[in-house]
Amino acid sequence: MAYHIVTDKIDLNKAPESYAPYTFNLSDKFKIVAQDELREDDDMRENALKQFREWIAKHPLIRKCRTDAPFLLRFLRTKKFSIPAATEMLEKYLTIRQVYPNWFFKLDINDPDLEAIIDSGYLYPLPERDEKGRKIMFSNAGKFDTSRFTSSQLIQVHSLVVETLQDEEESQISGYIHLTDDSELNIGFLSIWSFADIRNLAHCAQNSLPIRQKENHFVNLPSFANKLSEFILSVLSEKLRNRVFVHRGWDELKAKIDPKLLPKEYGGTVPEAECIAMFKKQLKERRDIVLALDEMEIEINKSSIPWADSTDADIASGVIGSFRKLEVD
């Protein structure tokens, strides 16, 4: 399956002289979802992009930022074209990248450790979307080598995968399904995490990252992980909690996901090795674009943020000041 590269050049000038024209090239299937679920049409999109770009250009704390349509539409579509909500999410997104550089910077597929984690089959997207157009992210928790890799590297891999995929407009509109095989999950996986990391990561995932996460499925979760899963659910919003499903086996999952979409080893058609190879090609193609994100910059008051131990309250209360209500002419 060929992957479409949405944009091949990144401009980080927050106020360029002109912007590349945008054309909606997706099928009617996605156009209908965009209209029904996101309130998106040509006029709404054009006006929202114009306001968003004006807001970024005037923002005194943003130094460098992507302003191309695929990037800004990540936020507009996640927030259903609410300008205040989308601009707030962009602020938080830029901020957490700088607050947690060990999670969100240097997302390089050529890093031997990150490449080894991808090669292991720990996390990769499945080639085909489901009937609703959603991208399925497949993970095998037991394939993450906790004796070799850290929780920070695990988060980096997730960040790398997300940033590589997020310019795909089909996913911006229809969203993602995350499916995890926990049958080989071992106790070492839990030992690499601190509760502070879990709390901060949960906050980042639900308030700062422009992802339409539609469903999370966990299959064959071992009993020793029950307490951890309860804690994770407790720090998620009710909306996200309602999108988490725990299945006792693969037959139970089939009621939610067509097994033909799964890797061949799980009853589908495409072997896992082929899925990983296709995705690695995409990772290599998008490498420079993903790494360019490290050059984005927003001014933050570091004295108000314990660099290595910021809490979700720090982010939620607006660590970058009181610029929430900048008006756009």
Image (cartoon, helix red, strand yellow):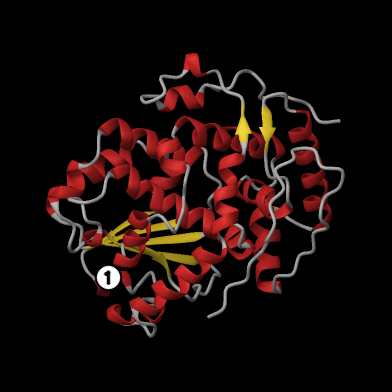
Q: Is residue 213 visible?
A: no
Residue 93 point in image, percent of width and height: 55, 38
**Residue at the extreme top of the image, as rendered:** 303
Position in image of residue 105 (x %, y %): 48, 42
Q: Where does label 1 land, which residue? A: 252
At 62% from the left edge and 38% from the top edge, which residue is drawn?
A: 296
Where is 268 relative to 94, above or below? Answer: below
**274 sits to left or right of 142:** right
Question: Residue at point 33% right, 42% down?
Answer: 152
- Count up the numbered dots: 1
Residue type of the residue flagged with mark 1: Glu
Q: Position of residue 183 (x, y in %)?
A: 19, 64
Q: Is residue 311 above or below residue 45?
A: above
For image coordinates 50% across by 63% down, the residue present is 283
Q: Residue furthest toward the bottom? A: 269
Q: Is residue 22 left or right of residue 137?
A: right
Instruction: Pick the residue in front: 238 or 280.
Output: 280
Q: Would you call the spot at circle 1 few (<14 residues within 10 Å), some (14-19), or many (20 or more)?
A: few
What residue is drawn where x is 28% and y is 80%?
265
What element does badge 1 sit on?
helix
